[in-house]
């Protein structure tokens, strides 16, 4: 089949890498892509938010499947335009993508589906904000109701900071703080059948030890040696399936990738948020462990045929990804800096470690930085310790002036895993 992937980040590079390894995929296209994706897919220019343009490109290329990577095109209804053109698409409708596009809508869906989540208030003015913050107390959790590229949430003990974030948003959801570790669990669904993937954990804060500002994610790992073996089944039964059933009941069936951000609290599993697409950087480690060819699974979700698929096959290996970010990220990042060492990683570290491009572009013979998160250096190993070693050995080969990365991705989990062994 011919597959067109929409997007330009490391998530899309991970998707394209997996699709390029699938013998069923005869042609692979990506729009607009990046310098790394160009090595595995044919790039095309398109405005990813323009549904008509994306659909026209898919028709022109004769695509048998379109995979929409980022959230903004999904919320804008790009998947609807592709479906209207008669092409199967992996990604929810604009109406269903509201589960990520509006946190207030997601809370309403969770209430209807009896999904466990934090108590919350939707606030539209300073008076409501002050009342809600007072009701819950510190630490304060303030979420922009709309899309904010993973950076719309502030968790702080500082009341003034909480109020300032709320004031900068049109509408906010203020909720109780959830204690305990966080888990990302993806599920592929066709609107009825729900196929959970393996759980992962990502690292949101910019600096080691979970210090510094929130980011889009600085690294991730899978599997989770500390998690209850029954976690996936429990979340499927209490969160994922009820949510998909509720969306269908409302007349906005959700097909594509439903991402549950979870807190494993002292009172049980609670949903922090839903996303309507693969998470970045968790996708990098989850797909690194998936052994079932990807294209057929995504096409089955697009065509309503997931119930007919055999169970997914997974590698026993662990995977770790480390994000290399540009100078000043998550503030205004510097771009245009040359990146060195990519050939060395390919020569010395493959196939166990490889570089997925996020914010890169070609400038003559050079690959240069073109965004905040620049690269996701991903590695596999027999356990988390080996995967970490391989990932950081590859990171050490890469040169990018002023770049930053966390040095503690998966360190705690690797230590726990080693102690269990």
Image (spheres, rainbow, N blue to C red):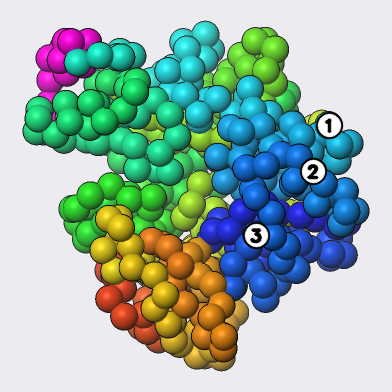
> Hey, which quadrant is residue 397 in on the image?
bottom left
Q: Which residue is mark 3?
A: 32
Disc 2 vs disc 3: Cβ atoms closer than 8 Å?
A: no
> Hey, which quadrant is residue 5 in on the image?
bottom right
Q: Is residue 87 left or right of residue 264?
A: right
Compute the Cα span from label 2 to label 3. Answer: 14 Å
Tag count: 3
- Position of the C terminus by quadrant: bottom left
Secondary structure of the residue carrying tag 3 is: strand
User: Up-down: is 213 above or below 39?
Assistant: above
Q: Which residue is mark 1?
A: 84
Q: Which residue is mark 2?
A: 55
Task: Point out which mark residue 352 bears.
Answer: none
Q: Is residue 159 left or right of residue 174?
A: left
Disc 1 vs disc 2: Cβ atoms closer than 8 Å?
A: yes
Q: Which residues are magenta?
A: 127-140
Mark 1 residue crowding within 10 angstroms, few (<14) / some (14–19) / many (20+): few
Mark 3 residue crowding within 10 angstroms, few (<14) / some (14–19) / many (20+): some
Compute the Cα span from label 1 to label 2. Answer: 8 Å
């Amino acid at each position: 089949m011919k597959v067109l992937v929409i997007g330009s980040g490391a998530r899309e590079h991970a998707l394209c890498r997996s699709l390029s390894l699938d013998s069923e995929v005869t042609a692979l296209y990506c729009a607009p892509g990046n310098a790394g994706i160009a090595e595995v897919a044919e790039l095309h220019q398109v405005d990813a938010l323009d549904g008509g343009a994306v659909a026209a490109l898919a028709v022109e290329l004769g695509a048998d499947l379109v995979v929409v990577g980022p959230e903004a095109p999904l919320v804008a209804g790009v998947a609807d335009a592709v479906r209207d053109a008669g092409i199967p698409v992996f990604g929810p409708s604009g109406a269903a993508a509201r589960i990520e596009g509006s946190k207030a809508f997601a809370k309403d869906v969770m209430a209807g589906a009896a999904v466990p989540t934090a108590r919350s208030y939707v606030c539209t003015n300073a008076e409501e904000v002050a009342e809600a913050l007072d009701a819950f107390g510190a630490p304060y959790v303030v979420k922009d109701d709309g899309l904010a590229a993973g950076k719309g949430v502030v968790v702080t003990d500082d009341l003034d900071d909480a109020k300032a974030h709320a004031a900068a948003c049109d509408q906010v959801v203020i909720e109780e703080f959830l204690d305990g570790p966080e888990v990302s669990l993806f599920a592929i669904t066709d609107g009825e059948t729900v196929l959970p993937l393996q759980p992962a954990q990502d690292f949101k804060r910019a600096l080691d030890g979970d210090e510094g500002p929130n980011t889009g994610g600085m690294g991730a790992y899978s599997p989770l040696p500390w998690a209850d073996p029954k976690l996936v089944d429990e979340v499927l039964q209490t969160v994922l399936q009820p949510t998909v059933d509720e969306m269908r009941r409302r007349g906005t069936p959700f097909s594509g990738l439903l991402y549950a951000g979870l807190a494993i609290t002292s009172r049980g599993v609670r949903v922090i948020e839903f996303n309507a697409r693969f998470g970045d950087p968790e996708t990098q480690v989850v797909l690194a462990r998936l052994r079932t060819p990807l294209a057929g699974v995504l096409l089955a979700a697009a065509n309503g045929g997931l119930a007919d698929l055999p169970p997914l096959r997974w590698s026993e290996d662990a995977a770790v990804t480390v994000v290399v970010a540009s100078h000043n990220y998550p503030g205004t990042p510097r771009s245009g800096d040359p990146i060195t060492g990519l050939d060395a990683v390919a020569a010395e570290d493959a196939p166990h470690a490889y570089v997925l491009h996020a914010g890169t572009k070609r400038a003559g013979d050079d690959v240069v930085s073109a965004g905040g998160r620049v690269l996701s250096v991903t590695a596999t190993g027999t356990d988390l310790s080996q995967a970490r070693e391989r990932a950081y050995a590859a990171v050490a080969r890469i040169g990018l002036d002023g770049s930053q990365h966390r040095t503690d991705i998966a360190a705690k989990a690797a230590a726990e895993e080693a102690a269990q062994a």
